[in-house]
Every structure is written in C-alpha cells, then in structure tokens.
Image: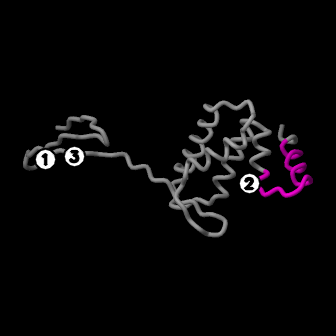
Amino acid sequence: MDTTREPAGGVRRRRECKSCTKRFSTVERVVESTPLVVKRGGRREAFNRDKILEGIRIACAKRPVSAEDIDRLVDHVEAQVVTLNKAEVSAREIGDMVLNGLRRLDEVAYIRYAIVYLNLKDLESVKKEIDKLLAER
C-alpha cells in the first residue's frame, strides 16, 4: 500500500512493510546536483546560474532581446550542463553553450559575448569572428 502527499520540502509517502505489515512514512526530495566548473587556471567552483545570466544580460544590453528569451537561454544552458551528467565541466564547455545560444538569439549579442569570452584583442580578430558569423548565414 502506498499513499502520497506533498508537504513543503518533498513528497511524503505512507507505506506498509510487506513482511510485518507495520506502517511508516518516508519523505522524498528531488536532489538536483550540478557539477563543479573547472576554470582556466584549474580552480574549481560551484556552477552558478546567476553568473551565466549576468554575462548574457550584459551581452544583450540595449538589444531587442526579451527577458524571457534570456531566461530561456539560461535554462537551456543549465539543462545542458546537468544533462552532461559529469562531476566537473570546463568553463570552456559552458561558454561554448552560451555562444551557440547567443548566435541563434542575437548576432550582435553573440559578438559582444565573443569579444570577452574568446578574448578578441584587436579589430582584426573581431572582424574574423564577424566574417565567420556571416558565412554561417
């Protein structure tokens, strides 16, 4: 026998032991584990959705990109990271996910993010990235 109730903080189940027929309760909680992010220098830190959100917001500033589109992109990146099912994910992999999403969302925001993320230091490297973007159209 199994009945289910949903209290705050989890799912409470009332169960019955099949061998002794005693009744007992269990509380089940969803545990979402996000991996550690491995930075360029080898340092590790907890995955932080807010950092991704802030970077995307800066790239999309004064662009015709809605807050809902930004949230969807952040949700998509976070879901991809969790789907990898790894204990550690490189910051590079996450940055590439953001770049791919921005490429589809807004090309100017993509270039803004790429300048910082890909460390484009001069106009020539920015021009190459723009040419690559235009060639993909």
**What is the number of the mark on residue 117?**
2
Q: Is residue 123 magenta?
A: yes
Q: Nearer the viewer, residue 16 or 92?
A: 92
Left or right for 26, reference 36: left
Q: Comparing marks 2 and 1, which lies closer to the viewer? A: 2
Check whether the beta carbons of the residues at disc 2 and disc 1 lie within 8 A of each other. no
- Please, what secondary structure does the residue beneath circle 1 have? loop
Residue at (79%, 51%) from the top-left corner?
Answer: 115
Would you say the residues marked 1 and 3 are in contact, meaning their CB atoms lie under 8 Å apart? no
Alpha carbon separation for disc pair 3 and 2:
46 Å
Mark earlier in primary sequence (2, 1): 1
In which quadrant will I find the C terminus?
A: top right
Which x, y percent locates residue 57? 67, 41
Q: Residues within 10 Å of mark 3 (few under 14, many from 20)?
A: few
| Bounds of the magenta segment | 115-133
Name the residue: 83% across, 43% down.
Answer: 133
Which element carries disc 2, helix, strand or loop? helix
How far across and down, in percent of the image, does residue 27 sit?
25, 45
Q: Which residue is mark 1?
A: 17
Q: Nearer the viewer, residue 21 or 128?
A: 128
Residue 126 in picture, x, y percent from top left: 87, 50
Q: Residue at x 87, y 40 (%)?
A: 134
Which amino acid type corresponds to the residue marked 2 in the rendered image? Tyr
Q: Earlier in the sequence, mark 3 or mark 2?
A: 3
Query: Outermost residue, bottom direction?
Result: 42
